[in-house]
Image: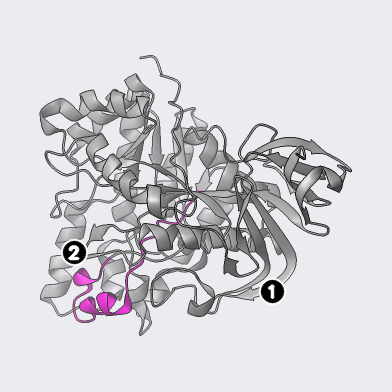
Amino acid sequence: MKPYDLLIKNGTVVTATDMYQTDIGVKDGKIVSMDKNIDPDLAEDVCNASGKLVLPGALDVHTHCQMPFGGTVTADSYLAGTRAAACGGVTTIFDYPVQHAGEPIMGIVNSKRDILQYDACVDYAMHCCITDLNGGLILDEMEQAVEEGVTSFKCFMVYKKERMMVDDATLVRILLRAKEVGALINVHAENPDMIDMYTEQFLATGKTSAWYHYMSRPEFVEAEADKRAVHWAKHLNTPIYLVHMADKEGLEACIEAKLEGAPVYIETCPQYLEFTCDVYKRDDGRNFVCSPPMKGQESQDALWTAIKAGLIDTIATDHCPFQTYEKDWGKDDFSLIPNGCAGVENMYPYMLDAANSGKLTFPKVVALCATNPANIFGCDNKGSLVVGKDADIVIYDRDKDFTVTLGTMHSDYDHTIWEGKEFHGYPVQTYLRGQLVYDDGEFVGKPGMGKYIKRSPRKVIKA
């Protein structure tokens, strides 16, 4: 028996801080050797990565597959979403199961795991959305969830009418409990009362197009909630993770808190880096409806500036696609448009294209898409190419031109906001724990290959 199942030779390995040439030997799904000039005869299978970059698989820590929302269910099943992830170089996704009144955390988490164990094409973890404390029982159960590897939870500061929102007192109780048990709280920050007020005003005056989705949730409506969330985190000394940051004012408040030493983490998404609110003026503007919406050019510029300065921690997608006919429910009433867009297959190629064009460095992209999310969320065996970690590996061809079309994607949706986007440089292979799952445009893995990732708790912060 040969010492390596897989040998990746002659490639340039990219870490969060460096790029260098080395070979990678893989055995039983783990990286067991990194050295120059490893003999190819020692491996069962050899990948010649000469002239190519060798990257850690990305972690998309914000996806919504097979999720009921807005009167329907997201277009990508767990199978389709994780298949698409593999084909975009994402080897771990994080799902957001939503707890409702009376449901225990692990009950809803395990109901999703029951599906994913058969359908997942990449590895998976979970953040559970807490919407009801069940008389305080959820606060007790958070400790058990952390012990079982669910070390992050989400709170909505919005979606009041949908009964998903938590009030400030509930958010504070959850933040304090998370500090006690070593968990991290993710927050969707927008002001629900302002959104409801604007929505009612616009609809009452016949302002019904997708443009008014943005106008009902403008920059300052998100910023107010960002500031409120960070205010609690700073004064309670509790870690907090702001999901899908889209506005300049809120971003600046989060950065200020970070620079003061507060444990504040910031995520943004490719759609906010590529598109502005002008998309909502298009005939197909409803396809771009997501929450928070894309904002103005000033906010987009601020996001890029913060990324380059190392002040944004992660890139994720909020992958939440719907079919065209479902988006069309809101052609005469923007409030009926299911909120969400596709992105899991586009994230890594998009960010790597930014590096290939010189806008960012490749190590910066690896930090944002792989190393940082793995470290923040306790995925000890993910996020970097190091001996002992999982052999989640992406081979990237800097010279390959690729145009996104519906036909070249691997999801189950019938449109994509990325249609026609051109990339110079593209992933050509993805390995999940040393197994080839994507090869030059084709998914070659199998449903059920993905495994549940039990994550490590955070260090408990003393009061």
Q: Nearer the viewer, mark 1 or mark 2?
A: 1
Q: Which disc, if any, is residue 198?
A: 2
Question: At 39% from the left edge and 14% from the top edge, which residue is drawn?
Answer: 462
Q: Is residue 208 visible?
A: no
- Tell me where residue 178 appears, x and y as whole percent: 32, 26
The answer to whether 121 is drawn above or below residue 330 in the figure is above
Q: Residue furthest front?
A: 1
Residue under label 1: 401
Which quadrant of the rendered structure holds the C terminus?
A: top left
**Residue 75: percent from left, percent from top:** 33, 67
Q: Secondary structure at mark 2?
A: helix
Is 335 covered by the magenta stretch?
A: yes
Q: Is residue 22 left or right of residue 390?
A: right
**Residue at x-position 10% and y-position 74%:** 204
The reply to whether the magenta stretch includes residue 347 is: no
Q: Quadrant of residue 425?
A: bottom right
Label 1 crowd bin: few (<14), some (14–19), many (20+), radius 10 Å:
few
Q: Is residue 263 left or right of residue 27?
A: left
- Disc 1 element: strand
For the N terminus, the quadrant is top right
Q: Which mark is residue 135?
A: none
Residue 216 appears in view: yes
Residue in the picture at 53% in, 38% down: 374
Relative height, residue 13 to residue 426 (above, below): above
Of residues 313 and 13, which is closer to you in this image? 13
Please identify the residue farthest to the bottom as the structure is shown.
283
